[in-house]
Structure formats: C-alpha cells, structure tokens
Image (cartoon, rainbow, N blue to C red):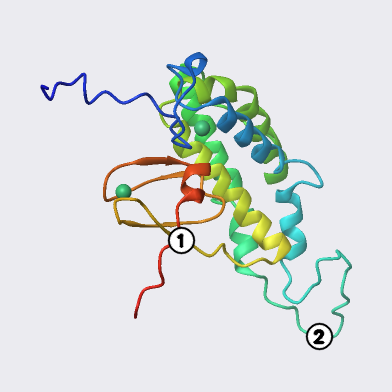
Amino acid sequence: MHDTAESAYEWPACSPCGRALRHDELGRTGCRLCQSRTDELLRKLPGGDGLYARLATRLVPGRGGDGSVVSVSRTPPLPLRLEPLSLMARGGVVTVLQTWQVDWHEQLGWRHPRWNGGLQQQLDQAVHALRLNLEWAAASHPAFGEFAQEVGSLVRQCERQITGERAERPVAVTCPCGTVLRITISTPGARCQGCSQQYARSEVLDLPLAQRAAA
Ligand SMILES: [Zn+2]
Ligand SMILES: [Zn+2]
C-alpha cells in the first residue's frame, strides 16, 4: 500500500466536540448538537433572573444564597468579592460576548454593532444578536469551536459564583495508547497528545480511569 494522502483522509469532525459530522452536517464547523448546546448556554445569561443578573447577589461576602438582604448598619462596609465582580464588570461576560459579536459582524461584512444602556441591557442585546446568528456561526464560522468553549466557560464561571461550587476537579483517563488525558466532566471532547486520536465527549468519558500516580 502506498501512503497516499487518500489513506490519511479523516472524516470531518465537529470543531467543538470532535464527533464525526453526519452526512447532513458535512461542510459545517460545528454539529447541530453543539449548536443547540451553545444556544442553551447563551439563554441562561440574559434577563432579570439570568445568571448575569444574579452575579450581583454574590458580591457581598458571607451573604447566603437565599437572596435575603443583610443589614450592615453601623458596621463598616464589607469588601466586595472579586470573582463575581470581574465577571460583571466591563472586561467580563459582557465584553467577551460583544467581542464575538464584533467579530461575527466583521466576518459577515456588517457594520460594527451598537449597544445601548447599562451593562445588563448590553448583555441582553449581545446575547440576542448572537443567538439570532448562531445557525450561521455553527455552520460557517471557522472559530465556532472556540466560541462554544468560551461561552461554556463563562456560564460555568457564573454558575460557580452563584451556587458557590468549587471548580470542577480534573479526572485522569488513559487512552489505549497509554497517554493520560486530564479532562473534566463537562468536557466537550479531547484530543490525545500521544496518538492524536480525537475523542467526542461520550467517548472520552468512557475511557478507563488512569491509575493513581505512584508518587
Ligand atoms: Zn459537536
Ligand atoms: Zn492516545
């Protein structure tokens, strides 16, 4: 057998999750599942009861998740917690999403987008615009994988602030080639550094757990 380009041909895979694209998805950057998963994530952010608005309830340390207001009269103001603040402020969630929106407008040859009002309104507007064009982005934007990953990361960071959960612990699994892959439960997929095998989410979670290192 000759080692031709043909024999090295790989079936096109979804950029966010690594799953082989179905026949009716060929030519797309991301599969339809990743598109709807990303849409679900985006839908969690806007609105008065969305994740972004709820970050404000986590700014004061020591305040319970029940939303009750603690009276702090006569005691000095508590310092604000930095993690929710950095997600809420300019440069956080709103700016990341707006940066993508600007990028999409450039890709589509549209004018620079405009936003009005405060950060909450700007977030709502950016999410609305991204969801409207998500079908195009999942099908045609070369960086849709990066976008999906970034949205997933933002939503997880907001959820962690609101629920007070710790960061997901990485899990070590072993590829049949012997390489150990560090993944998290919410991983969209992974590529083995050893043999370059691309695993979809369900496949990577099926790999055997790595033996604990001796040391
Ligand atoms: Zn996918
Ligand atoms: Zn491998």
Depth check: 209 or 98 in front? 209
Who's the residue at 54% across and 31% down the image? 101
45 relative position to 65: left or right? left
Kindly identify the residue that appears in the image at 61 percent across and 67 percent down: 166
Q: Quadrant of residue 214?
A: bottom left
Looking at the rendered structure, which numbered label has been put on residue 31? none
Q: Is residue 26 above or below residue 174?
A: above
Q: On residue 75, which mark appears?
A: 2
Q: Say which quadrant the N terminus sits in.
A: top left
Q: Residue furthest left?
A: 2
Of circles 1 and 2, the one toward us is 1
Circle 2: residue type: Thr
Seen from this angle, which residue lies furthest bottom? Answer: 75
Say which label, 1 or 2, has the lower sequence index. Answer: 2
Vertical order, 166 against 19 (above or below): below
**Residue 167, position as x, y percentages in the image:** 57, 64
Q: Quadrant of residue 71?
A: bottom right
